[in-house]
Image: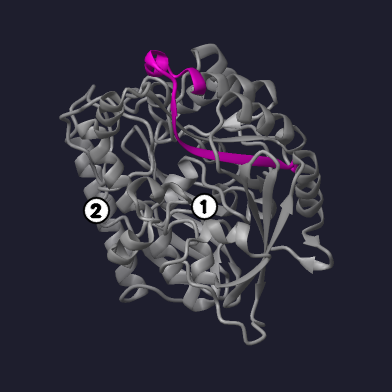
Amino acid sequence: MTTGPTQSTAWRQHEEAVARLRASYAAIPPGAPVRLAKRTTNLFRARAASTAPGLDVSGLDGVIEVDAAAQTADVQGMCTYEDLVDATLPHGLMPYVVPQLRTITLGGAVTGLGIESTSFRNGLPHESVVEMDVFTGAGEVVTTKPGDDLFETFPNSYGSLGYATRLRIRLEKVPSFVQLRHLRFDDPAELAKAIAEIATAREHDGTRVDGLDGVAFAPGEYYLTLATWTDATAGETPSDYTGQQVYYRSVQQRTTDLLTIYDYLWRWDTDWFWCSGAFGAQHPLVRRLWPRRLRRSDVYMKLLGLDRRFDIADRLDRRAGRPLRERVVQDIEVPVEALPAFLDWFDDEVGMRPVWLCPLAARQKWPTYPLEPDQVYVNAGFWGTVHVGPDAVNGPKNRAIEAKVHELGGHKSLYSEAFYDPETFDELYDGPHLAAVKAKYDPDDRLTSLYDKAVKKR
């Protein structure tokens, strides 16, 4: 067992941090929004302004304990996956699912939805949680486990049921390196067939597959990346995509690759997938001048915040006479057999590329995000803007995506903008059940409801 100065000190500091959280909650006036006072965010939806003090989560951002023998870790809710991985990898262990961006927090990935290339075999981050403490709207810390109504409803509740202060999660053993194979497909039907087969067999051409994701670069150009954990490098030097080379381009340029396990986990973060190009960070000259330590997703998020604050992109578009942009930043899941129909529709109606593809299979049906257990789904992630003209403020592309995903039997994550009417929202996210659990643990309705958060931007 390890972590922190000593085990007892780490637990004592955790209890002190929870006490500060309680005190800060008591200081928020009744009727004022309850929000976390944190410096970083991975949400892409605006919120109404508030002058009320936020919840003090200082001291709730670390790893309390790693039990290497049991392959578990007790982790505070505001701990980033970057810090969590730094604590587990020295033991040859990693969380079952490590979302793509360094500053996603464990609590955020559980109360929201995280995903990565191990999700086809390990599900979503909340499915490796064995116990958690939740600070509820009643101002209480409730310890909850699988089977409890609070535990089962917590995933995808986005703070409407409370905030996780501590989570005990399972860890899996990993070696030092990852061998990659990049497979190209010209036909989306063949792509979907391969995903289904690999996700079921967990191997391809006789070689085990530990991680599986892909990229749709253009109609007729699709890639799957098959990752295999390994200690055998055959003398090969691992690639480095934190320097001049850009990872996503290598998917098109190479058939095989080798990364350290650490660099594999953060392969997408250095360039925010491909979105760093919007800031010039992929230009060779700019890249040489841009410090490595600042090539990371949270830096790009801050730059995006400046763009929003000063309306930079819209001002430039107006000056150039271009139509208004609609921001289309979404992650959706559709059954694997519906992936070709979705990609074809997306090409025709939205036309944004590249698109990230990540297969997943949930281990059970979770009320607030009811994917069918053991059904292979594919997450499609697309992040950018589309010139649509004056109707941009009404979100026509986003609304069309919501309707299509619903039609295909899929679901949409709620970290970004949503436009559902209340009835459809309740149907998709089991609104009545969520409301009943919220009433039980937040009897005075202190916390903002999921619909008000996700759709009304409160």
- Between 23 and 383, the one lying in front of the other is 383
- Residue closer to the observer: 33 or 27: 33
Kindly state the secondary structure of the residue where label 2 is placed.
loop
Residue at 51% over, 77% down: 91
State which quadrant residue 141 falls in.
Answer: top left
SS of the residue under disc 1: strand
Residue extending farthest to the bottom is 235
Q: Which residue is labeled 1 in the image?
A: 131
- Picture quadrant where residue 188 is located: top right
Asked if labels 2 and 1 touch by Cβ distance under 8 angstroms, the answer is: no
Q: How far apart are marks 1 and 2 (CA)?
A: 22 Å
Compared with residue 160, is residue 21 higher up or lower down, i.e. above or below? below
Left or right of 419: which side holds 232? Answer: right
Could you tell which of marks 1 and 2 lies nearer the N-terminus? 2
Please give the label number shown on residue 58. Answer: 2
Up-down relation of residue 25 to residue 392 (above or below): below
Q: Confirm whether residue 38 shows in the render.
A: yes
Report the span colored magenta: 374-397
Horizontal and vertical percent position of residue 376: 73, 42
Q: Is residue 113 left or right of residue 122?
A: left
Q: Position of residue 98 (x, y in %)?
A: 52, 57
Would you say residue 172 sits in the magenta stretch?
no
Which three-letter amino acid code belongs to the residue tagged 2?
Ser
Tell whether 450 sits left or right of 378.
Answer: left
Foreground mark, 1 or 2, reads 2
Q: Which residue is drawn at 79% across and 49% down?
A: 194
Mark identifier at residue 346: none
Q: Does the magenta stretch include residue 379?
A: yes
